Image (cartoon, rainbow, N blue to C red):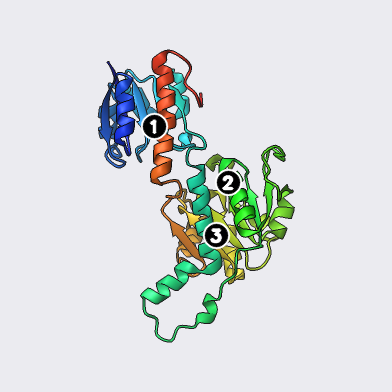
Amino acid sequence: MRKLLITGSLPESIKKKLENLGLEISHYGVNDLVAPDKFKQAIEQADIYVSGGYEEGKAEIIEAAKNLKLIAFLGVDAGHFIDIPACTKKQIKVCNTPGANAISVAEFTFGLMLDAQRRITLCANATMMKEQNPDYSYKTSNTLYGKTIGLIGFGRIAQNVAKMAINGFGAKVLYNTKSGPKLDLEPAGAKYVSMEELVSNSDVISLHVPRHAGSMLAKEQFDKMKAGITIVNTCAAENCDPVALLAYLKKDKDAYCAFDGFYEEVDEHNKSAIEELRKLFFTQFVVTPHVAWRTHESDLSTLEMAVESIADMVSGVVPRNLLN
């Protein structure tokens, strides 16, 4: 009987589907295998590993997996948690679950846009702290309806954001991708433009690129932005240069940022800027703990997609959504 190791949530419906594939299941919570020694021990005899926790599948972990044939990553950015080259070297297949959480992240993106434009967190904190005679002038906000929203990247999440923006908020949508226009995927009302045109004309800019894309917003882009812009980022914080961002926020006190996740890659060049950005939390910057994707619905659809890939392998066919 093949052994399956899974971390994260495991609804009963998914468990039954895995058991019906003849798999012996070992289930751990999201943080249970963060310690490398525990992870090594758990994965040593596994044939299949479903990655839904915060453990990292580094090369030494992969090397310890004696029987591993397939890793199903619950999400898109598998390379951030799994050493894919090490897997390829050991002929371990790695697949992901593209699009399974696109609606959830798109909704959260709008939550951050509304929070930033209307200063919801700022006002909520002031209310809960029972400010005495607060100066509400600094809490005056802007509507989102009818604004120009610029999307950097135009994958499944950004496409859903575009539809919500146009249909729900009467917004004009501009987008830019490194690969050029995606005319077959554009909803009516969305327009491909150059990066320069996007940053110069948008009231709100939202990032939708993979972590490895690097810094998409740096000094060159900030120098061209409108005053009082809102920047939303539900991908990696590192896709926005912290040094340039800090300089811009200091210069424009009406600008506002809303990120789902904060900077993880700290070095001597950006350390000071990142610490200064922390001081702007709840005045010009709101941060959530990288949870845009996390809904009951996306958890289930992500697991359903992973089960399909596992079923492929069990049936002797090439698993879908392979990354190597």
**Among numbered discs 3 and 2, the one appearing first in the sequence:** 3
Residue 117 position in % (x across, y down): 56, 66
Q: Tag 1's secondary structure?
A: loop
Circle 2 residue:
160
Q: Given the image, on which type of amino acid does mark 3 rest?
A: Met
Left or right of 53 in this view: 165: right
Q: Judge depth for marks 1 and 2 and give the one in front.
A: 2
Residue 175 position in % (x across, y down): 68, 48
Indicate whether 253 appears above or below 67: below
Q: Residues within 10 Å of mark 2 (few under 14, many from 20)?
A: some
Identify the image quadrant of residue 12. Answer: top left
Q: Given the image, on which type of amino acid does mark 1 rest?
A: Lys
Residue 169 position in % (x across, y down): 61, 59
Instruction: Say the numbered circle drawn on residue 58.
Output: 1
Left or right of 321 in this view: 12: left
Q: Judge depth for marks 3 and 1 and give the one in front.
A: 3
Identify the image quadrant of residue 287. Answer: bottom left
- For image coordinates 43% across by 13% down, the residue present is 316
Indicate whether 131 appears above or below 148: below
Q: Tag 2's secondary structure?
A: helix
- For image coordinates 48% across by 17% down, the residue present is 318
**Among numbered discs 3 and 1, the one appearing first in the sequence:** 1
Residue 66 position in % (x across, y down): 32, 19
Circle 3 residue:
113
Instruction: Say the numbered circle drawn on residue 94.
Output: none
Q: Residues within 10 Å of mark 1 (few under 14, many from 20)?
A: some
**Which one is nearer the viewer's eye here, 306 or 264?**
306
Q: Tag 3's secondary structure?
A: helix
- For image coordinates 67% across by 39% down, the residue present is 185
Q: Given the image, on which type of amino acid does mark 2 rest?
A: Asn
**Which one is nearer the viewer's eye here, 182 or 267?**
182
Kindly report the distance in space between the C-alpha atoms of the residues bearing marks 1 and 2.
33 Å
